C-alpha cells in the first residue's frame, strides 16, 4: 500500500460560512464536531493513518482537532499541515 492510499485530506468552510460563525458553542457546532470525530474514527478503521489539514479557520481546524483527539487513543496517526500560502498565519 502506498502512503497515498493511507492518507486523508480535508478542507471545508471558513467560520463566515458556518451557521454559528466564530461561536464554537451550540447544538449544531457540537453535532458537527461529534460527527467529524465519528468520521475520522471510521476512516482510521479503514486503514488511513496520515491526515493532511489545510489549517484554515473553521472546518479545517475542527477536522485537525478531531484527528489530534483520535491520536490520543489510536496508534500510528500522523498529521501534516498543508499551509496554502505564505501569509496564511496573517489571515
Image (spheres, rainbow, N blue to C red):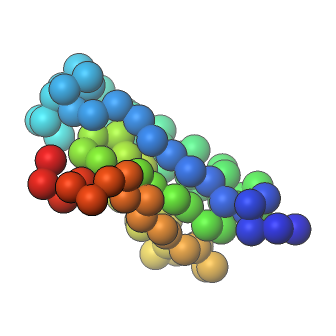
Percent across and percent down for residue 22 are 13, 36
Number of callouts in the render? 0
| Horizontal arrangement in the rendering, residue 64 relative to residue 51 (left or right) | left
Question: In the rendered view, would you say 13 is above or below 69?
Answer: above
The residue depicted at 19 percent of the width and 26 percent of the height is 16
Q: Quadrant of the N terminus?
A: bottom right
Q: Is residue 63 above or below residue 65?
A: above
Residue in front for this viewpoint, 29 or 12: 12
Tell me where residue 41 sits by quadrant. Answer: bottom right
| Left or right: 80 in relation to 61 | right
Residue 51 is situated, as x and y percent measured from the top left of the image, at 55, 61
Residue 87, image x and y in percent?
21, 55
Judged left or right of residue 68, residue 19 is left
Decide if residue 25 is in sight here. no
Give the farthest residue toward the front: 86
Asked whether the viewer can see residue 84, the reply is yes
The residue most toward the right is 1
Asked whether 30 or 83 is in front, the reply is 83
Residue at 30% x, 48% y is 56
Q: Give the residue drawn at x 78%, y 59%.
A: 5
Indicate the position of residue 55 as horizontal and vertical percent values: 34, 54
Q: Nearer the viewer, residue 27 or 10?
A: 10
Q: Is residue 43 left or right of residue 73?
A: right
Amino acid at each position: 500500500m502506498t502512503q497515498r492510499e493511507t492518507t486523508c485530506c480535508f478542507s471545508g468552510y471558513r467560520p463566515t460560512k458556518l451557521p454559528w460563525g466564530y461561536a464554537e458553542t451550540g447544538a449544531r457546532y457540537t453535532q458537527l464536531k461529534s460527527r467529524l470525530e465519528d468520521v475520522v474514527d471510521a476512516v482510521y478503521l479503514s486503514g488511513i493513518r496520515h491526515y493532511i489539514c489545510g489549517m484554515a479557520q473553521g472546518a479545517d481546524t475542527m477536522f485537525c482537532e478531531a484527528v489530534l483527539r483520535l491520536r490520543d487513543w489510536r496508534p500510528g496517526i500522523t498529521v501534516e499541515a498543508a499551509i496554502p500560502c505564505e501569509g496564511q498565519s496573517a489571515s
